Image (cartoon, grey):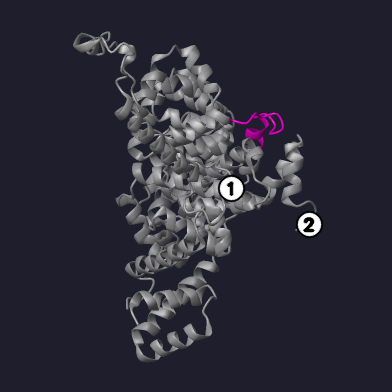
Amino acid sequence: MTGRDDLDLVRECLAGNRPAFEELVERYQGPVFNVAYRITGGRDDAEDVAQSVFLKAYESLRSFDARFKFFSWLYRIAVNEALNVARRRERFEPLGDDHAAAEAGEIEADRDRILEHGIAELPPDERAVITLRHFQGLSYDEMAEVLGIPANRVKSRLYSARTRLRGVLTKKGLTSDD
Amino acid sequence: MTRDELLGLINREIDGELSGADRKRLDAEIGRNPGAAELRREMLDLGARLSATHPLPVPPTLKPAIHRAVAQRPSPAEAPHRGLRHAFRTFILPHHRSTEVPMASPNTRSNRPARKYVVFGGAAVGLAALVWFAIYWPPVPDDQASGTIGSAKKYRSEQITGSDVQLAGTEAEATAIDGIAPAAKTDLVNRMVLQDRAAFFARISLDAKAMLLAQASETERTAALARMSPEERASVFAALPVADRAAIFAQATASEAGAVYGRLSVADKSALAARLSVDDKAALLDRYVAAEAKASVTARASVAERAQAFERMTAEAKAQAFDKAAMAERHAMLSRMSEEARASMFDRANLAERVKMVDRASVAEKAAALDRIPVAERSLVFDQMTVAAKTQALERMPADQRAAFFDRLPVAEKAFLYGRLSAEERTVLEGRQTR
C-alpha cells in the first residue's frame, strides 16, 4: 500500500480531517460495493448498502479498535448491513415467476450469470462466506474477524456453501449430477 | 469414506489446505470411486470459477453520494459517544442486527457477546432477587402485632390505571411514537442516526411515516423507503401531500430517484399510480430536478411505464430518456409524442434507428419522417423499408419525389408497385422512365 496506511487515515479523520475519510472511501468503495452486491444480489441495494456502510463507519469511527484491521471492521459493517437488507428483501420480495422466467432465458446465454443466480439462492450467511473467500480473497482468520465467528465455523460454513452451490448449479444444468 | 469426509477433503483442496496424508486419502478414494472423481472435478471447477469472477465496477454515483451524506454529518472528532442510546438500540430494539458493534476477537463464540452477558447478568440478578423475596418477603413488622389485618393491607393497593400498564417491545415503541406530538416526534427522530430512524420507521403508523419522510434527508428517505414493504411504500406516498411527494424525488439524485422507483414492483407502481391524481403525477414528474434523474427513473420502468412517464417530461428530459431507451421503448415513446416532439426525436436517431422507426411508424409518420431527413439519407432509409412500407410511403409522396424513389426500386418491387398506381401516376412515372 502506498502513502498513508488505513490507521493513519483513521487518526487524521478523528482529528477532524474530512478528506482523510474521503481517501478511505476511495480505497474501499469497490470492495464494499462488491461485498454488498454479492450478498444482496442487487446493484441498487448494493449502492444503498455501500453508502450506508461508509456513513456508519464515519459516524462510528471513534468506536473503531485500532488493534484490528480497518478493512475488517469496515467489511464487518458491510456484511451485517448487506445481510440485513438481504433478509428483509427475502421476506418481502420472494423470487416470483417473472424472475424465474428471466432466469430461464439467461441460462443458455451466460454461465457467469447462472453462477450469480446460484449464489443468490444460497442463504445470506453462506453468500457472505462465499463472497469474502472467493470474491474478496480473505483468509479464514480474516473472515472470522469480519463475521465475528471462530475460524473453524467459517470453514464449515464455507464448505456447506460450496456444496449447496454445486447442488443449485446442478439443478440449473451448469454441472452434471453425480 | 463418507460423502461428508470426501467433501471436506475436496474443500480443503480448493483452499490449498490439503495435507500430504489427506492428499493420499483423497487420491485413493478417487482411484476407487469414479463418482468421487467427478465430484472433485466439479467442485474444483466451481472453486476456480468463483475465484475467477471479476469485481463489478463501482457506480460513479456512489462516491459523490457518500461524500454528500458524510458532509451533512458532524465530524467524528465532534461526535459524542452514543452510550445509552447505542445500548438501547442494541439491547432493546428487536430484530436489529447491529452493524456498529466494536470489533470482537475472532475467537469470540458469539457475535453479540455483550448481549449474552446482559442476558446472563439479568438472569443472575433476577434469581438473587427471587431467593431474597422467597426468604425475606413479606417483612415481619418489629412489633409482630399486625396479625391478619396487617397482612391483608398488603393487598389493598390502588386500582391499576392506564399509566401503570407498560407495553413491551414493538407495540410499546409504536404506541409511544405515535402518541407524541408531531413536533416532538420530529425532534426525537432528528436525534437518531440513520439506522435508528429506519428501525423506528418500521414500527410507526403510516401517517407518522409520511410526516417524518417529508422532513427526512434524501439519504434517509431512500433508506427508509427501501426498508418498507411495497404496500407501505405506496401507502406512505399516498399519505404525503403532493408537494412532499414531489420534493422526495426533487431532492433525490438520479441514482436515488431511480433506485426508489426501480424497487417498486409492478403491483406497487400500479398501486402508487392509482393513488395519485393526474395532477399529482404531473407535479411529481415536473419537479424532478435533473433530466438525468428522469432518464434514470424511466430507464428502470417497463416500456409502457416509460412511455407514460415520457409524456410529462420536458423536451430536454425526453431527449435524454430517448437516448437511453432501447428500440422497442423508443417506438412506445414516439407513439405518445406530439408530431413536433417525434420529429425532434427522429432527428436524434442514427440511420439504423431511423430505418426501424420508419418501419414501425404509421403512414403519415413515415411521410413526415422521410421529409425531415436529407435526401441522400432518405434514399438509404427508403431502401431498407419493406415493400409494403415503401408502397405506403410512395403513395404519400409528391409525384416528383415518388419518381425519384421509384427509380431506386428493384424490378420486382417496381412491378408490384406499378400495379398499385393510379393511371395519372403511371403516366408521370412512364414519362420519367422514357426521359
Q: Which residues are magenta?
A: B67-82
B362 in the magenta segment: no
Residue most toward the front?
B143
In the rendered image, residue A118, in percent from the top left (x then y), is placed at: 40, 62
Residue B119 image label = none
Label 2 sits on a secondary structure element that is loop
Image location (x, y in percent) of residue B154? 26, 13
Q: Quadrant of residue B92?
A: top left
At x 65%, y 53%, the residue is: A69
In front of the other: label 2 or label 1?
A: 1
Q: Which subunit holds the residue at mark 2?
A: A
Find residue B321 and report its horizontal and vertical position in percent: 53, 40
Kindly identify which residue carries mark 1: B103
Label 1: few (<14), some (14–19) or many (≥20) C-alpha neighbours in 10 Å: many
Residue A2's disc number: 2
Type of amino acid at the residue the image marks with label 1 = Met
Task: Classify mark 1: helix, strand or loop.
Answer: loop
Determine the chain carrying the residue at label 1. Answer: B
